[in-house]
Image (tube, grey):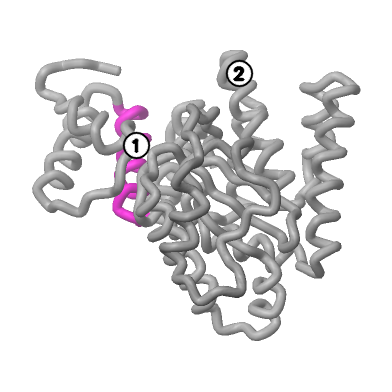
Amino acid sequence: MNTDPQVDIDIINNMLVNEHRKVSNPFKLKRLRNAIIAFKKEDYLQGISLDASYRVYINQPKKGYELVKDAIKKHGNHFILAHALFACANELGDWPLVKSALENILTLDVSDIDKHDFLDIYNHQSIMNIDDSGKFYNILEDFYAIEEQQKIKDNFAMTANMLVEHDVSIMTFRKILKVAIAQIYATYSLNFNVLLSDQKDLQLVFSSDYWSIEDTIEMTTLINDAILAIDDDDFQVEADEVEVFCINFSMDKLPENFSIYNDTDDDLTGLIKSRMKDTPKPNLEVLDV
């Protein structure tokens, strides 16, 4: 990254790189916009990527996606643009676009580290969306040994079976996932983990060690309110089988049969605090979603 003093690197790092709750301060946003314009003069392709990230930050991922698609047509399928396209598609929550962007990245000549990271993301999101269509099995064969392929296939089957056992369709689950991710990205600029767990109810859990307990309560409420706002009776019947909540500790510390709901009249805040207050907060292995 060019560190020319005319380019305000600090505001770019603070708002587009560091994890935080999004800010809407117009002065900071203008400063960020000016920094990106200056950066584009120094490194045009990186500037396009930053411009797309800015669109994502202000909750305009569709405009960012279109911006990058146009740049790819004009300048070629460079990794930096392909990465930006994935980031925009990911925030849109449009799984077909995310899948296409990831498969595109995996065809490029990138470093082994980048390749490994995006393979992990591709497998995780394919399994989470219960989608083994297209190039899924070709990618498994191209990049994984037989034993690893079988492990991924087993995880895929296990996830699919969870939905079947709870009478939740793939389309309903994908819609829940999309709504939840959109609520998180609308509020925060951060990475988070996602877990589908089969307890008494089917649980969709989002985890970030950035969040405070109060943050998890707020996000849990926002996500569930957004799900309940969908005017579709069939969807609501199935969605009721999925318990969705956020935590601020590692997934492997989630107690067995953990639930934020019970038969008492306690409010959501009390329930989550009582279940999380004594839970340790180890460092997370963060996976982009």
For the residue marked with disc 2, what is the amino acid?
A: Asp
Q: Does the magenta-highlighted stretch encompass residue 19?
A: no
Q: Quadrant of residue 54?
A: top left
Q: Residue at x 59, y 25 (%)?
A: 117
Image marks 2 and 1: residues in contact by CB distance under 8 Å:
no
Closer to us: 178 or 70: 178
- Mark 1: which secondary structure? loop
Q: Residue at x 13, y 46 (%)?
A: 30
Q: Is residue 6 above or below residue 82?
A: above
Is residue 240 toward the left or the right of residue 46 in the image? right
Question: Quick check: can you spot residue 73?
Answer: no
Q: Which quadrant is home to the N terminus?
A: top left
Q: Which residue is mark 1?
A: 19
Q: Does the magenta-highlighted stretch encompass residue 47?
A: yes
Closer to us: 239 or 213: 213
- Mark 2: which secondary structure? loop
Q: Which residue is mark 2?
A: 109
Please state the horizontal and vertical placement of residue 69, each as a whole percent of the image: 47, 44
Please state the horizontal and vertical placement of residue 216, each as a whole percent of the image: 43, 53
Q: Which one is earlier in the sequence, the residue at label 2 or at label 1?
A: 1
Tell me which segment is drawn in magenta: 44-60
Q: Is residue 274 above or below residue 228?
A: above
Q: Quadrant of residue 40?
A: top left
For the residue marked with disc 1, what is the amino acid?
A: Glu
Question: Quick check: can you spot residue 111?
Answer: yes
Q: Quadrant of residue 167?
A: bottom right
Is residue 227 toward the left or the right of residue 273 in the image? right
